[in-house]
Image (cartoon, rainbow, N blue to C red):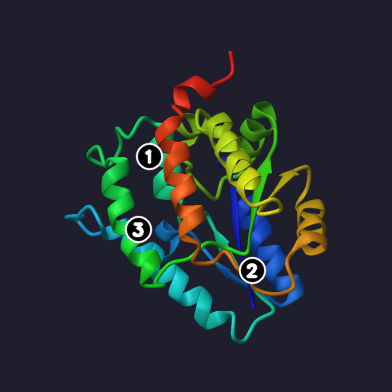
Amino acid sequence: MTIIHMEGASAVGKTTTSSALALKYGGYHIPEVNTLWKRPEIEYPEWFFERQLDRFRIAQEKSKDHRFVVIDIDLFQPFWYNWAFGFTLFGGQSLEFLTDYFRKQLLARKLGFPDKYYLLNINEAELRKRKEGDATRRRSGFEMNLTFIEPQRHYFEALNSFIPGLVSFIESVSIENNVQQIVETMPSRPQEHTYSVELFDFMISWLRENKASDLLKG
């Protein structure tokens, strides 16, 4: 059945929307990596990548018994997140390093693209308000993550230009509104681009040709 990815800035409502959507409409919600697994004391470079493969495997299994599966945070996040910070994070993992690992997994069908992406967005003032009003999460990387919002939008717009309709952009004014818009636009069946090497190659080329720092406002 259908597999979707939920994306957006910290405090925009990804997890709450994903949970509400799955609960109300018979879906299955797969939380982010840090919720499902504890990082090892000595973390090797591929550890986080392997957890994305685990989440994809879980999604495939759960999709057999549920109307849809919603994955909280994009499985391909290591690409655009590292890119947004100039590939300076996590020991300086390069685009080439990421590409080599993920291409093999895509070809082996151990990882695939979602049937649709949903990118939630809201203004910075509202994000800060929501962060302050949520005592259940620390959101230690909140300030740093504010800087990827604009580059992230450009990235998903690029994917949407390559496969029209792949991404829906939702102004996250309320959880109820988010859920309603997703239900109205969610594909009813798996799409043909799940294991698309063409989409993967486009993603890599676009990240290589565009610098996140050039896409920041002002």
Of callouts 2 and 1, the N-terminal one: 1
Residue farthest to the top? 218
Of residues 208 and 62, the one nearer the viewer is: 208
Of residues 141 and 81, the one nearer the viewer is: 81
Q: Nearer the viewer, mark 3 or mark 1?
A: 3
- Assign a secondary structure to mark 1: helix
- x 41%, y 45%: residue: 79
Residue farthest to the front? 198
Q: CA distance from mark 3 to mark 1?
A: 14 Å
Q: Decide if residue 25 is on the left or right side of residue 140.
A: right
Q: CA distance from mark 2 to mark 1?
A: 27 Å
Of residues 133 and 174, the one nearer the viewer is: 174
Q: Decide if residue 213 is on the left or right side of residue 150.
A: left
Say if 58 sits above or below 181 in the image.
Answer: below
Residue 58's label in the rendered image is none
* Neighbour tally class for label 2: few under 14, some 14-19, many 20 plus, Cα within 10 Å: some
> Residue under circle 3?
102
Of callouts 2 and 3, the N-terminal one: 3
The answer, for residue 167, to whether it is visible in the render is yes
Say if 18 sits above or below 128 in the image.
Answer: below
Q: Decide if residue 126 is on the left or right side of residue 109.
A: right
Q: Amino acid at mark 1?
A: Asn
* Neighbour tally class for label 3: few under 14, some 14-19, many 20 plus, Cα within 10 Å: many
> Residue under circle 2?
191
Of callouts 3 and 1, the N-terminal one: 1
> Residue under circle 1?
82
Q: Amino acid at mark 3?
A: Phe
Q: CA distance from mark 2 to mark 3?
A: 20 Å
Q: Amino acid at mark 2?
A: Gln
Residue farthest to the bottom? 65
